[in-house]
Amino acid sequence: MIISNVDRYEEDMWIEIAKFLDGRSLVILAMTCKWFNRIMMEDSVWKYACLRDLQVPDPGKVAFKWIKLYAAAFDGSHTYMFRQQEKHIDWMRIGAFLFDSTAALLSESLIAPLRIPDEETTDRTLQLQGCCLLKNIKAGIWIADLQLVRCPVCDLDSCDGTMQTLDARHIELFLNEGYNNGSWDYDVLGSHNISKHADGASGGIFDIKHLKDQTTSDIFDLKSWVGKKNDWQPKAVVTLHAVAVNTNLQNNEGIQIKYQAMKAGKEGEVVAIRISQQLL
């Protein structure tokens, strides 16, 4: 079939128009006729939409079609919908960031400069420095959410929820069979208690390679994003290679902080991370 210059122009024109449409609008347009279906289902169209709406640069090669990655990012799903749904109370999307390297610094302290731990046990670095080093991270786009979960040590329906979780996952996580069949699960990296009044519950996930980047330094400018003293609403910030959360706390007797990670199989890459803070 010979395609006329007019057809070429129309196709290019509609691909440009598609760059201004959200996912729902793209699907609606694709359903109007076979011609629009072919154009709107182009992987390049969904790649542009995904990167635009997540506000991240191109991560390079991905294992799934971009329309599936878009759906996994924007269909309202989060990790507690798949497991522990009975404990889940509320959540909010923070945003997306990139792991460019394969090492992450997890920290409950958001005061610069953060020191990268030596090759010590995770429990020791958590006790001494309030942070830990996590290797073999799956590079690419990560999506971060802030979760509010019922205290895991009680089953009271009246519980208001005393645990917050910074929950980050690789964009491909929900599309993997190992995750969906339950063979991938979270392992506890370590935990420790702060047995005194805590002013706030904070947590951050940083790409080691970009720890000193200017964009990452925005997280340490707490005045620009952390709530004022009497503001009890959770706050969060995401940069190109890091994410952090903070919630100011009222009078308390301390918090327990737990670090968890999920691997893609026993020796696989890390594909999900959680930092949880629970009131004691």
Image (cartoon, rainbow, N blue to C red):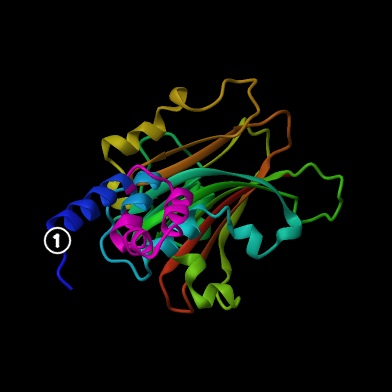
Image quarter in which the C terminus is found: top right
Q: Position of residue 82 (x, y in %)?
A: 64, 65
Q: Position of residue 199 (x, y in %)?
A: 62, 30
Q: Nearer the viewer, residue 238 or 93?
A: 93
Circle 1 packing at 10 Å, graded few (<14), some (14-19), many (20+), is: few
* Residue at the (43%, 46%) spot, across then down: 22
Q: Vertical placement of 83 versus 161: above or below?
A: below
With 11 as the anchor, is 227 left or right in this view? right
* Residue at the (49%, 60%) spot, across then down: 72
* Residue at the (36%, 32%) spot, across then down: 218
Q: Vertical placement of 44 versus 242: above or below?
A: below
* Residue at the (45%, 27%) spot, across then down: 222
| Secondary structure mostly taken by the magenta-highlighted segment of the chain | helix
Q: Position of residue 261 (x, y in %)?
A: 51, 63
Q: Nearer the viewer, residue 111 or 163?
A: 163
Q: Which residue position holds label 1?
A: 4
Q: Looking at the picture, which amino acid does disc 1 mark? A: Ser
Q: Position of residue 37 (x, y in %)?
A: 38, 62
> Regarding mark 1 in the picture, which secondary structure is present there?
loop
Image quarter in which the N terminus is found: bottom left
Which residues are drawn in magenta? 18-47
With 251 as the anchor, is 180 left or right in this view? left
Residue 72 inside the magenta-drawn segment = no
Q: Nearer the viewer, residue 187 or 27?
A: 27
**Is residue 171 shown to the viewer in this render?**
no
**Is residue 95 shown to the viewer in this render?**
yes
Q: How many marks?
A: 1
With 8 as the anchor, is 163 left or right in this view? right
